[in-house]
Amino acid sequence: MNRQQLIQQIRQKKSYLCVGLDSDSTKIPAHLLQEEDPVFAFNKSIIDATHDLCVAYKINTAFYEANGIKGWQSMEKTLNYIPSDIFTIADAKRGDIGNTSTQYAKAFFEAMNFDSITVAPYMGKDSVKPFLDFKNKWTIVLGLTSNEGAYDFQYLESDGLTLFKNVITKVSSWGNDENLMFVIGATKTAQLQEVRALIPNHFLLVPGVGAQGGSLEEVSKIGMNSDIGLLVNASRQIIFASTGGDFAVRAREEALKLQEEMASYLG
């Protein structure tokens, strides 16, 4: 999916909601465990309930990889079930030397046909560039994360700039705003304005709204650009709103709350 197609979806749906399918097999409703593929059955219901309210789904691959080959099958079935006009994210946080990154890119862009993948930039340009060589695919680089451990490295100063600013500045020169996004945690709104000054035109994937305490209002006010430029992810708040038979209904209710709030910011 290219940039204009993504923007069109956002404006059409009045939503920049990304639903995170962090489908922990130990947390899905008990009545689904009798299904042949409980995780896919869960995801299918979540997608049916929310696809008209969101513009992206983010599949956290760890929750699938943990289940071995069955998990990969659940992930592939889920990916194939997502409507073709919805942006798909492999939240895999890959990144290695060039030839290895090329294989990671082939796995997620060709074998599984995700629109995008999250990438860790620690190993530098030759670990990120192979992902950028794929046409109409997106590389989503970890810029500033919401976790407590972010303070271990991301705020250290180098050449007068914090490390996360150095990373964002340097990585943004390796691609462009049509194939590069950055992950910026929703709990980092104090830094979001600084990030926007560095990369005014790039899309930002913003996790951490809802269960992690991030404010959708603040993120939208500070992070939005002329093309909206945001994908705000919510996972647990939506998919685990209930663990009973009404889980899909409750998921839709939570997604609708976020979509309606987003619509108010879009005007």
Image (cartoon, helix red, strand yellow):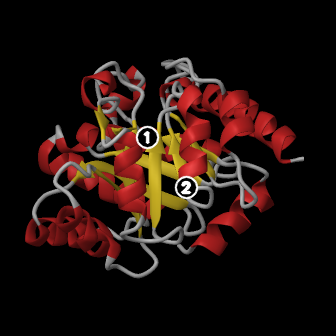
Residue found farthest to the right: 267
Residue depicted at 69% across the width and 65% down the height: 7
Residue topped by disc 1: 21
Q: Secondary structure at mark 2?
A: loop
Task: Please state if 76 lies on the left or on the right of 265 as rendered.
Answer: left
Reply above or below: 75 against 218. below
In this orientation, which residue lies closer to the viewer: 63 or 10? 10
Task: Please state if 197 lies on the left or on the right of 142 as rendered.
Answer: right
Quarter of the view holding residue 98: bottom left
In this orientation, which residue lies closer to the viewer: 186 or 28? 186
Q: Position of residue 99 (x, y in %)?
A: 9, 72
Kindly tell me whether residue 23 is visible in this rendering: yes
In this orientation, which residue lies closer to the viewer: 152 or 44? 152
Residue depicted at 44% across the width and 45% down the height: 183
Q: Position of residue 248 (x, y in %)?
A: 58, 32
In this orientation, which residue lies closer to the viewer: 18 or 231? 231
User: Dot 1 surroundings within 10 Å: few (below 14), some, or many (20 or more)?
Assistant: many
Q: Secondary structure at mark 1?
A: loop
Residue topped by disc 2: 199
Kind of residue indicated by mark 2: Ile
Reply above or below: 111 against 199. below
Residue depicted at 29% across the width and 69% down the height: 131
Residue depicted at 80% across the width and 37% down the height: 260
Q: Nearer the viewer, mark 2 or mark 1?
A: 2
